[in-house]
């Protein structure tokens, strides 16, 4: 059964009940009286009929079904099946001691019948997907991480909760080879309250208990929903590990790209709110049925078929960052984006919703943060090239700007940038992903570059670089032919390395060679004497020192002086001591 049950009062209006159904995606609602006793059920069809007749303000008690068939928590599956078939029922309320404690739907029955049949068919199978997953998980995880999960499960069980390992960790465990130990660095745990919703603070309470067991972990609590995170950094036992712990929840997007409204719910609703079927998997860590795999949306089949499939048709309208996540998972895992999912992506992009939100300066800072995070994941990954190509194929770069297209020239610039960064910055002191993003944005009209940089909340250096890019490029492109080395150095040394690299990627070959020579050779040239030598020669420190040293450097670059003696003679002849 599903528990708790979404209910309304008999006086709830038809319009209010319809909004509740829409918000939570239910096909019907249970109606309860003042003492929470079940008095009726109203279906979506009942509500549609009332709305069609213009009775949006009428109470649900006028349209609800009162002649109810109910069952108890101990009713066997065979009787549930018989009741549904005999009376053509889509759902059966579960009542215990006069109180509504749960509900069973036709989908629940079909799923249970299917799973029982599969278990009988595969009794001799060693496939871990059809049996308890705990031995398989224990085999694939490091002992210290497995022990942590055991501690978490015990702490949840003591409080009367179920605990689930959910999302990407389950996906990666199912995809991994049984012969290799899987190094998980990001784990999601979800607390569910059995037959009643766990308090929203359950995740925090469990995290605090685990912090007592692992005092070396850093505890972070964030968000209105009290999600907790435990963090280890280069721990000798757990390495660098991030564990998110939350209460099972459901969410609703009041408008496209909004921050979702979240409230406590069941594990099924928690999985339903996720992005793709392969990420909507969970393994129960507590008894009874520990090790049970929860797969309500065919995630295992999609893992076997190597495909990315979205859960909801409006998923990309609600959150455009899911487009980038779909591409990231597809390229990283070597999967294909399922055909219907691709249609949903293209529809969302072509709708123009992202452009309208951006131009209207719609208040969605969390969306911007998520979008920038997805761009960082993609552009910092070794597979960034394939991901950008797939985003362009889906026309999803338009989520950033309607004019952003991966032309042959832009693709060449990105590849050139990577080659230069690999040689000039092998230790990645610079933020390579950010520079790739700047090259993408730089392909736009100069007036749009800063708008997008500000929209994505890029660092000030990046915004300044993009703002000044046109002026600097024009200055460099207008350099006369046959410049002296010293003239090139005096011009280019005013700009930081990231600026020069980005300009080089966008310049014609001659200027590119000048910038390369400046970065790799000429900028490293030093004059034979420095300020200390000038003091020893009798010169007093003054603003003139800079002029002397600059002229010495220029003369050295242009090979007018080649050694210390020539440098000293040059200084005395051009700057005689008075």
Image (cartoon, rainbow, N blue to C red):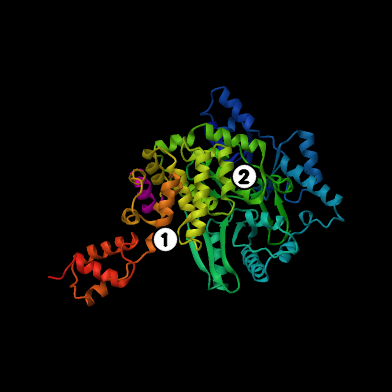
> Could you tell which of marks 1 and 2 lies nearer the N-terminus?
2
Q: Can you tell which quarter of the image residue 194 is in?
A: bottom right
Q: Is mark 1 on a helix, strand or loop?
A: loop
Circle 2 SS class: loop
* Residue located 37% across and 53% down the image: 461
Label 1, residues with CA under 10 Å away: few <14, some 14-19, many ≥20: few
Task: Give the magenta part as a residue range.
Answer: 458-472
Task: Name the residue that disc number 2 marks.
Answer: 37
The residue carrying mark 1 is 521
Query: x, y percentage for residue 130?
Result: 79, 54
Report the Cα–Cα distance between label 1 and label 2.
Answer: 84 Å
Name which residue lies at 71% across and 55% down. Answer: 175
Q: Relative to 217, does residue 178 appear above or below in the rendering?
A: above
Residue closest to the eye, 411 or 155: 411
**Is 461 included in the stretch rendered in magenta?**
yes
Please say if the residues under marks 1 and 2 sit with CB atoms less than 8 Å apart: no
């Amino acid at each position: 059964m599903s528990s708790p049950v979404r209910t309304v009062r008999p006086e709830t209006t038809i319009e209010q009940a319809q909004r509740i159904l829409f918000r939570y995606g239910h096909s019907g609602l249970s109606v309860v009286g003042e003492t929470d006793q079940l008095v009726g059920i109203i279906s979506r069809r009942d509500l549609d009929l009332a709305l069609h007749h213009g009775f949006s303000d009428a109470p649900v008690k006028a349209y609800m079904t009162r002649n109810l068939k109910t069952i108890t928590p101990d009713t066997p599956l065979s009787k549930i099946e018989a009741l549904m078939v005999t009376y053509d029922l889509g759902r059966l309320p579960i009542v215990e001691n006069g109180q509504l404690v749960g509900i069973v739907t036709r989908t629940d029955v079909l799923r249970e019948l299917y799973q029982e049949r599969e278990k009988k068919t595969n009794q001799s199978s060693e496939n871990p997907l059809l049996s308890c997953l705990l031995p398989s998980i224990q085999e694939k995880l490091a002992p210290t991480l497995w022990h942590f999960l055991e501690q978490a499960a015990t702490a949840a069980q003591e409080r009367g909760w179920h605990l689930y390992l959910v999302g990407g960790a389950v996906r990666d465990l199912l995809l991994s080879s049984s012969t290799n130990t899987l190094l998980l660095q990001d784990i999601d745990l979800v607390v569910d309250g059995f037959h009643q919703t766990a308090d929203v603070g359950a995740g925090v309470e469990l995290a605090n208990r685990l912090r007592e067991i692992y005092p070396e972990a850093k505890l972070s609590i964030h968000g209105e929903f009290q999600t907790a995170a435990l963090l280890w950094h280069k721990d000798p036992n757990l390495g660098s590990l991030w564990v998110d712990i939350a209460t099972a929840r459901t969410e609703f997007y009041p408008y496209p790209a909004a921050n979702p409204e979240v409230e406590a719910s069941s594990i099924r609703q928690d999985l339903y709110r996720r992005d793709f079927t392969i990420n909507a998997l969970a393994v129960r860590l507590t008894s009874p049925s520990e090790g049970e795999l929860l797969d309500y949306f065919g995630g295992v089949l999609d893992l076997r078929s190597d495909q990315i499939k979205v859960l909801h048709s409006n998923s990309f309208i609600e959150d455009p960052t899911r487009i980038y996540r779909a591409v990231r998972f597809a390229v990283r895992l070597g999967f294909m984006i399922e055909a219907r999912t691709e249609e949903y992506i293209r529809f969302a992009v072509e709708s123009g919703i992202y452009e309208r939100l951006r131009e209207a300066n719609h208040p969605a800072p969390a969306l911007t943060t998520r979008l920038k995070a997805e761009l960082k994941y993609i552009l910092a990954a070794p597979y960034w090239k394939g991901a950008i190509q797939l985003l362009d194929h889906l026309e999803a770069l338009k989520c950033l700007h309607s004019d952003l297209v991966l032309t042959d020239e832009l693709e060449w610039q990105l590849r050139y940038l990577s080659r230069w960064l690999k040689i000039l910055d092998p230790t990645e002191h610079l933020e390579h992903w950010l520079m790739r993003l700047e090259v993408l944005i730089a392909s736009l009209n100069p007036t749009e570059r800063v708008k997008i940089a500000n929209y994505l909340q890029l660092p000030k250096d990046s915004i300044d670089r993009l703002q000044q890019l046109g002026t600097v490029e024009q200055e460099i492109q207008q350099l006369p032919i046959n410049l002296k080395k010293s003239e090139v150095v005096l011009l280019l040394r005013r700009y930081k390395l990231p600026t020069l690299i980005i300009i080089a990627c966008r310049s014609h070959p001659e200027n590119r060679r000048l910038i390369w020579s400046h970065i790799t050779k000429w900028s490293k040239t030093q004059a034979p004497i420095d300020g200390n030598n000038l003091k020893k020669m009798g010169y007093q420190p003054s603003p003139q020192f800079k002029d002397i040293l600059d002229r010495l450097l220029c003369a050295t670059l242009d090979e007018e002086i080649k050694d210390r003696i020539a440098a000293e003679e040059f200084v005395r002849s051009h700057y005689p001591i008075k």
